[in-house]
Image (cartoon, rainbow, N blue to C red):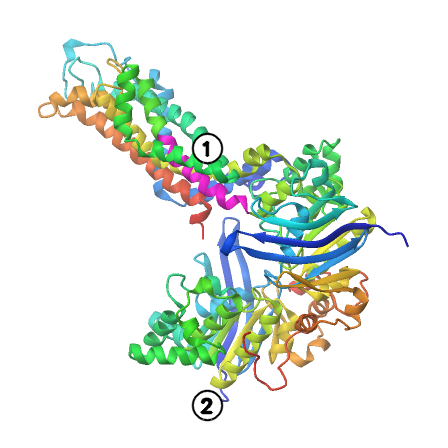
Amino acid sequence: MKRRDPLLIVDGLRVTFDTPRGPVAAVRDVSFVLGREKLGIVGESGSGKSQTGRALLGLLARNGRMAARQLAFDNVDLLRAGEGERRALRGGRISMILQDPKFSLNPVMTVGEQIVEAFRVHANVSRREARLRALAMLEAVHIREPGHVFDAWPHELSGGMGQRVMIAIMMVPEPDLLIADEPTSALDVTVRLQVLALLDDMLARRGAALIFISHDLNLVGSFCDRVLVMYAGRVVETLRADELQSARHPYTRGLLACQPRVDGDGSDLPTLDRDPAWLR
Amino acid sequence: MSRASAIEIAGLDVTFGRGRRAFRAVRDASFSVTAGSSFGLVGESGSGKTTVLRALAGLLPPAARIRGEMRLHGEPLRPARSRPLRRRLQMVFQDPYGSLHPRHTVDRILGEPARVHGLDSIDRRIVDALADVGLDASFRFRFPHQLSGGQRQRIAIARALIIEPAIVLLDEPTSALDVSVQAEILNLLQRLRREHALTFVLVSHDLAVVSHMCEALAVMRAGEVIENAGVETLRADALRHEYSRELLQAAQGYRTTPAGMPPAER
Amino acid sequence: MSAVRAWLLVDVPRSRWQARCQRFFLGWLAFRQNAGAVAGLAIVAALVAAALLAPWISGSTGVVPDLGNRLQPPGAAFWFGTDELGRDIFDRIVWGSRITLYIVGLVTVIVVPIGLAVGVVAGYVGGWLDSALMRLTDIFLAFPRLILALAFVAALGPGLENAVLAIALTAWSPYARIARAEALTLRHSDFILAARSQGIPHHRVLAGHVAPMCMSSVIVRLTLDMAGIILTAAGLGFLGLGAQPPTPEWGAMIALGRDYLLDQWWVPAFPGLAILVVSLGFNLLGDGLRDVLDPKSRS
């Protein structure tokens, strides 16, 4: 594929959930085009940022429905593709990293076995070969003693270590697109930066794109290339990350202003007045 | 200045378990909190900050061994707490989804502690407590699942305040909330502290929140207090300990390290 | 109708009563999705209705012999036929529903409070008390239910109350285990810690905070257990150790009817069918309730 082509085209994505009180729209008409870049999707809880990521992977809850005018990954129409083709894409070329490694790693398999299995499924290699590659992969995610971690059980890992292992597993199929939903929110602040640095490194090495879903405007602004700001299921503003401080939309400006600052003076923080006009 | 200490902790040591499996969660921690001020306890998971808070609140399991001294307005604090003592020291928990009983209405959540402590005119107190945290009376008969995270945390604060404590222990009160809601809750806490002359002990990993809220802070790591400082030191970026500075850096977003390579796992 | 619905679904309840109704209604909406559960509820409701309306549904008291109509086959006059003493089997089954309900009620009243109290105290307090109470539970868990019931009835004499008492005595232990498991996890939850830090006394925390959270698993387990309890009661009746003739207890009816199994099949078949349907009803209901109430099975 040509490097210039957009990797993912999302046009008019809608996600609706059926509840006892009637249908609830979680994502309303979200459109964006993703190249080989790090795209941040920022919003508060209920903004639809997570459901956008889940819809792209076909991971909506059972009462959820999605619709779009166009949804294309690398020129494959995801709306019309067969179930098999979609599953192949989602397992192989699109991967997802979730918030808490505790819930995404299988608790009854050692870390090594899980990486080996991923290699055997996606790369179709022998057990010996898979083991060697798994050890190399653990080294690639900057784990000092890969042999030691290989034999460890998921519950023996710290949060940061667990998230490194998750990144390793997700990188096995050499995906073109990684969707990370709050990948560092469960981690300690100092570990957070190490994991992000690792993620950055892995993406650069494979030339893969990233959709980084987070509530943390500062973090996304400093890590990604471009930022989509979501509010109540819509994209209210799209910005280059380095232009975040000069955001135009009052919602984005409000979000930036209401964060406490280390060098602030302790006076009351400005709060966000939600304008009903933003919903239109 | 004759501002008395509301809380004094000297050489506090907390150990869980016995023998070979013993784990010293807090090691020789000391700090004191001026009455009417707000004190920040900063650290990452496993630093022992929550254990210190629970020791103060009298919520450690009976098997935990506590040594050292804890004083409340000069009186020693022991693990066994009388009801009047509990009343003076209230706590707000981190997770607003877990700290309210899922089957109790707001009415009961606020009414029960008031009733247990033998307060009068409970109905009026409930309505006042709701108003105090910025909620109108229509919230009174809702269940927690009908409230947003920020509203729940307001209820949790109202529950702590309805029995008129002198000291409120705040365990990461805003880390589970959106930033815009965090701002509202932090403003609310500051206002309540002024109006009710409260003393706060705030546990957080976020130095920005601590800088905003507190007059003094202690940084904890692996059970030890590694630095005691006033907030001016923090705001002037003059924390001494290397780890404190690392925390401060982390609070300010992602920067690639000079070499361009991620630091290895320690 | 829609006004009631709106009142039930409104975002802001205005009173304690409305809040409570609302929670119940949302549970009902979820329950209604499960066709089997609704069928189970219908069966159990029919059982209750039959018990309440027995004098009006049935044409006789079901105990007076009518030797002129012995062993009539099912037909227009006698829907389920008559037994060896000429009593209408349909009427006897209708009256028997009262006995079944009585068994169900009595077992519930004994088993739930004992099991809940033992389990919640053991789980919440912990330590040696937990060990002592759980060993006691183990002892009762190890008794074979029917054998103990036999011994009990042998000592106290046959009769429905003694049979139920024997069943209840062996049935409470699983509830204690369930309640303890729930209480163990609840003990460390924030809302229990919050209650303790507020100085709410232990007995109030136990009764008002811990026990309600254990109730749903206990109710589900109880409904699922009901089938077994009804069967055991019927078994005791069959052995002649439960309800005594001429009481129209379903198990005893099968026992008396087994002599006619080959030639007059309806005599044992219809009470058997009644036991089957009611047991099935309780099982289906329990399954549905679990989906609604049990927090662990919720996605």
Q: Is residue A72 above or below residue B98?
A: below
Q: Residue at x 39, y 42 (%)?
A: C288
Q: Position of residue B12 (x, y in %)?
A: 68, 54
The stretch of residues the image draws in magenta is C171-188
Q: Is residue C180 above or below residue C147?
A: below
Q: Position of residue C195 (x, y in %)?
A: 62, 41
Q: Position of residue A119 (x, y in %)?
A: 35, 76
Q: Residue furthest left?
A: C263
Nearest to the observer: residue C208 or residue C101: C208
Give me the C-alpha separation between circle 2 and circle 1: 70 Å
In this picture, residue C157 sits left or right of residue C219: left
Per the rendering, the mark at residue C118 is: 1
Which of the 4 quarters of the picture holds residue C101?
A: top left
Nearest to the observer: residue A212 or residue C146: C146
| Mark 1: amino acid | Val
Q: Secondary structure at mark 1?
A: helix
Question: Is residue A229 on the magenta stretch?
Answer: no
Q: Residue at x 30, y 31 (%)?
A: C143
Nearest to the observer: residue C253 or residue C204: C204
Chain assignment, label 1: C
Q: Residues within 10 Å of mark 1 (few under 14, many from 20)?
A: many
Chain assignment, label 2: A
Q: Can residue B151 be seen at all in this image of the molecule?
A: no
Nearest to the observer: residue A178 or residue C54: A178
Q: Residue at x 60, y 78 (%)?
A: A224
In this picture, residue A174 sits left or right of residue C86: right
Q: Position of residue C192 (x, y in %)?
A: 58, 43
In this picture, residue C217 sits left or right of residue B39: left
